[in-house]
Image (spheres, rainbow, N blue to C red):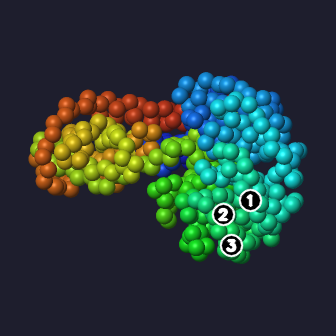
Amino acid sequence: MNDKEKILLLFLMISILTLSFTYSILEVSAISQPHYLTTPKLTPTHITIINNRLVVYDAVENNLIFISKVDESIKILKAPRDVTDITTSGEKIFMATSTSSKLYVYSLMEEDIREIELPSVPGDLDSSSQYLTVSLPDKGLILVFDPVSLNELSRIEIDVDHGSRKISVDDGFLYVVQSDGYTLAKIDLNKNERQYLRIDERIIAVKAFSNNILLASSEDGLYKISRNLKIERRWSLNKGSTIDIGLHMLSDGRIIYVARATWIIGEIDGDNIREVRVEGRIFDDVLDTDRIWFTEINTGKIGWVWLSRPPIVKSIVIEPQGGGVFKASAKIYDPDNELVKAILIVIVKSKIPYLIADNRTYDMEYIVDRDIHVSEFWLNPGEEAEVYVVATDQVNNIGTSEKIPAQFIEEETKTVTFATQSTTSPPPIELTDLYLIASSLILLIPIILAVLVMKTRKKVRKKSRR
């Protein structure tokens, strides 16, 4: 590579870094980035929620760790070894193990653990406010208990598949993945009536919510099934997503899936699929009212992701006010009705090729009676700019507007106009001239270095000739 090519390469690298800086703020996250508790290091596996406390099973110490969501205070209870599943109902925590044919029940009221003998080692647990269901694949049975009295209500003979997430109880119905792996059975627990649905892909997991059913398949498919067992929708997830997956549905219709093996938490909202990556291999997850909790087996962390959706900047209008003053108005909608903060960003184009643009930011004021955010900004004569709005909600989800051009040429302006009432805010400190000089000096550094290299090489060549 000759010296001219090296100089051009340096300019290209600087340009790429400039673009990366300018547009990085445009990244949008639907569900939030992961957050983590500051609890002492554990070996967290299974996780659930009861009475505003997280309940985490430590697989090394064989303890149940109760963690307050308010102050992260901890209470520890000795638990059985080799716990394979945990679920809750009311004031009780239910546990199954891989080595015992017992159901373990911890009561918050009595603060003790009871044992219920089962016909064989349990395969899967699921619960609601009315029912606790326990699958026994080796016996071809599902036991149904009253979660309050712990009385056995019924025994359902069905060829249930082995593994976790193969049964789900909701609103008086039990959904069962049968041992062939392709058939879903729906059982009315009051009438003992059954319906069946067979799909062409092996069913990895089932979860029911308010008469809606979610199925994850071996082909990385996610199915939404209606209450009468009709396929309503199928989404294709990224490869490996369903190897080990958690399924959740929100009251607003969004679907949350946890692709544990690929360290991904995803959100499906209609046709849109958005994902965030966590820091480790997810072992288990549980849905809370405003977030989803998860455990990371390889990092020993307990984390969460907010379920809040980002604000939407529905429109932005730029009005010239005269003398280089412009007013920006933005209409912003938050799907979760959270408070929104809006910032106006003005990117002033450089007059010198390859120089970094001048970014100016302004806080926008919310006008309640008009339901808009407004701010003013200033341009010097001859300056051209691109203007856009960045809106953030209470959990730092980001929404951005389209970019609107603005230019000030003496008393003429080129921009989008719309009649609105003006509001005044103080002008920011103008650093354009200082910024241009500093940027120019920075760009001279690689040129000076290149000249020095060339001179050094010439001296070396002269010495070698002698």
On the image, the x and y values in percent for residue 46 come to 72, 41
User: As rendered, which of 239 and 384 lies closer to the eye?
Assistant: 239
- How packed mark 1 is, by other alpha carbons closer than 10 Å (few <14, some 14-19, many 20 or more), is some
Q: Earlier in the sequence, mark 2 or mark 1?
A: 1
Under circle 2, the secondary element is loop
Of the residues shown, which amino acid type is indicated by label 2?
Leu
Q: Is residue 252 left or right of residue 243?
A: left
Q: Which residue is mark 1?
A: 154
Q: Is residue 351 above or below residue 269?
A: above
Front in this rendered view, residue 433 or 407: 407
- Residue 217 at x, y percent in the picture: 70, 65
Give me the residue at 72% from left, 36% from top.
106
Residue located at (50% from left, 57% from top): 254
Q: Which quarter of the figure has residue 139? A: bottom right
> Which structural element holds mark 1?
strand
Q: Is residue 466 visible?
A: no
